[in-house]
Amino acid sequence: APTIVWFRDDLRLADNPALHTAVELGAPILCLFVLDDSDELRPLGGASRWWLHHSLEALGDDIRGLGGTLLLRSGSAATIVPELAHSIGAGAVLWNRRYGAAEREIDAGIKSELKDAGLDARSFAANLLAEPWEIVTGQGQPYSVFTPFWKASLQRHAANPPRHPLPAPTTLTAMSDPPAGDELGSWELLPTKPDWAAGLREQWTPGEAGADERLAEFLDGGVTGYAEDRDFPAQPSTSGLSPHLRFGEISSPQIWHTARDGRRHLGDDGATFLKELGWRDFAYHCLFAFPDLATRNWRQAFDRFPWPDVDQDAFDAWTAGKTGIPLVDAGMRELWATGTMHNRIRMVTASFLTKNLLIHWKLGEDWFWDTLVDADPASNPFNWQWVAGSGFDASPYFRIFNPERQRERFDADDAYIKQWVPEFGTPDYPEPIVDLGETRQAALAAYEQVKGA
Ligand code: FAD
């Protein structure tokens, strides 16, 4: 009886516990990906759809290279997976875990249905350094502050290191005569009119090989100076691994072990880099503890925040990078052109939207969700709430980023601004749409209502 390996946020062959186990079982394998359009799931944004198309193309090629097949289906996974298992007489269905509430519910339903029918249905830990429930306080509760979370994580990893990466299979015994699936092109994941993806194509190579190459390049050079340089947007000194991690083309344990490989002496730079992976784990820890992370304030007091009616013109100026605040505009244009934005500038643009424009973090989170290639169900809402002040371990509300001060500190020669805003410094560049000082005072006044709650 064949084994189905159901791929989801783990589009890789190496360090893939579900695939690895399927190979060990020895039965013929059918690889499956479902484009799930269930109402309970948040639809992917445009940039993520672009990435997914190319990532599936790469995965399909890699699987074919081993002699296997990747079957594509669209619809509701809750229906498709059990039906497929029955129709091909599968003996086992294996997958790697995901952590959103709706996703977990779908997976649990499928698992119990398959088990009731006598199949071997199993899920595996694959994409985090530790499962979200494995790091808990002395009282057995989830952490809500990063520093103690990371301290506890490091203690755990010292005693019980993240899983050693599993090798990619060298060959796959494919199921003979697999059922027919969809053509990838029929899913229309790529933009057509207009084709806004030119800058994405230039910058990114979705797929496992592209991910491995990024990591190797980063560890060979980029990581040197990372602890200091990672805050300067004009120097591309960060890894660029986030979209590869988002789609599971590489795993956190792979990065962890490669970076800690004894032959490298990464020192502070390596520790700082691994700590960033810790933030990613923490975002998943928080999503698991608070499944409404993308839709509700974690700190309930923020439900009382007096958001004014949305100023649509101001929101449009923000999305288009035409606010007249150069660092904000550079970031928003980088995002539109490339599908990414430097971390420091994400903080600056998010602070400007929520505090200077007093526009709800959810609108900003939605825009990022649509435009980021690394748009992540945990990291995106987690960081938006962190900047807004409503989330886990958020910075104190009164620490409002001043984009001009940030510019002096992190882009002193305006190199990043000039890269993205060519008309900067000319009469064509707009005046600021708001006064930074006045809007800061208005934000602090609005915050009084939260404090009083
Ligand atoms: P590196 O500096 O090389 O870091 C290595 C890895 O650590 C990253 O790839 C990422 O997986 C992880 N990481 C780093 N910083 C964070 C962080 N603050 N939170 C969680 N993980 C982190 N990151 C996403 O992956 N997806 C998102 O949707 C996302 N949305 C964000 C929204 C806002 C408003 C802000 C302020 C940050 C957001 N981030 C998000 C976090 C961070 O900006 C990106 O992870 C980082 O810029 C990716 O670049 P890199 O891979 O070169 O990072």
Image (cartoon, helix red, strand yellow):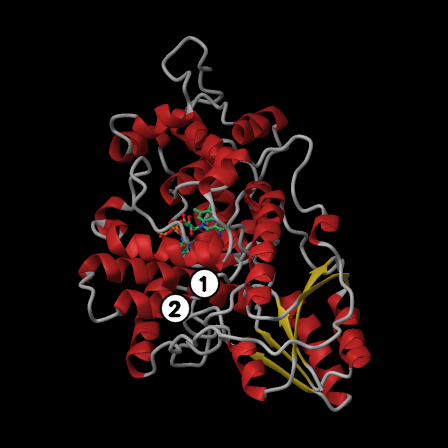
In the picture as drawn, the residue positioned furthest to the top comes out as: 427
Image quadrant in which you'd find residue 235: top left
Residue 347: give x, y in percent of width and height: 41, 42
Front-most of residues 136 and 45: 45
Residue 388 lies left or right of residue 164; in this view the side is right
Q: Residue at x 25, y 70 (%)?
A: 261
Residue 111: give x, y in percent of width and height: 69, 81
Describe the element under mark 2 as helix, strand or loop. helix
Q: In the rendered image of this protein, does residue 189 appear above or below residue 63?
A: above
Describe the element under mark 1 as helix, strand or loop. loop
Sort mark 2 into few (<14), some (14-19) or many (20+) by Cα contacts within 10 Å: many
Residue at the spot of label 1: 250
Q: In the rendered image of this protein, does residue 121 appear above or below residue 436?
A: below
Image quadrant in which you'd find residue 32: bottom right
Q: Residue at x 29, y 43 (%)?
A: 231
Quadrant (top left/top right/bottom left/bottom right) for the N terminus:
bottom right
Residue 379 lies left or right of residue 75; in this view the side is left
Asked if marks 1 and 2 touch (Cβ < 8 Å), the reply is yes
Q: Residue at x 42, y 69 (%)?
A: 143
- Kind of residue at disc 2: Gln
Residue at the spot of label 2: 254
Image quadrant in which you'd find residue 276: bottom left
- Kind of residue at disc 1: Ile
Front-most of residues 263 and 361: 263
Residue 389: give x, y in percent of width and height: 45, 49
